[in-house]
Image: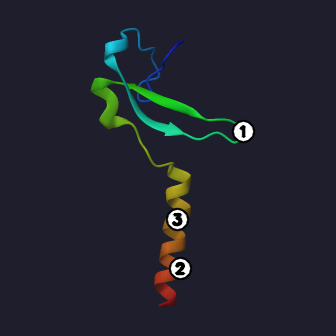
Amino acid sequence: MTRVCRACDEEITDPADGVIVMHETGNSGPGWDVWAHREHADDVELIDPDLLRIMTMIWVAQAAVK
């Protein structure tokens, strides 16, 4: 099984160097684990930027109503 680092998009060749940084759910099935090199684990964005943008607009609109 080939594991690719989410931060640098390079293959993780040493199994001891790879860490699971999150699990993404699938629409049909169990989903998959997201891997990164140990040194890149903190560089992986865990929040989808589009989702964050949409949620920020919702939160601002809710705060304006209050």
Figure check: 58 above or below 16: below
Q: Secondary structure at mark 3?
A: helix
Question: In the rendered image, which quarter is residue 10 located in?
Answer: top left
How packed mark 1 is, by other alpha carbons closer than 10 Å (few <14, some 14-19, many 20 or more), is few
Q: Which residue is mark 2?
A: 61
Mark 2–mark 3 distance (CA, rounded to whole Å): 10 Å
The answer to which of 45 and 20 lies nearer the viewer is: 20
Figure check: 62 above or below 6: below
Q: Which residue is mark 3?
A: 55
Residue under the image location 69 percent in, 42 percent down: 27
Q: Position of residue 7 (x, y in %)?
A: 41, 29
Residue under the image location 59 percent in, 41 percent down: 25
Residue kind at label 3, given as amino acid type: Met
How packed mark 2 is, by other alpha carbons closer than 10 Å (few <14, some 14-19, many 20 or more), is few
Query: Mark 2, mark 1: which one is toward the viewer?
Result: 1
Residue under the image location 50 percent in, 50 percent down: 49
Residues marked 2 and 3 touching at CB (< 8 Å): no
Figure check: 53 above or below 14: below
Mark 2–mark 1 distance (CA, rounded to whole Å): 33 Å
How packed mark 3 is, by other alpha carbons closer than 10 Å (few <14, some 14-19, many 20 or more), is few
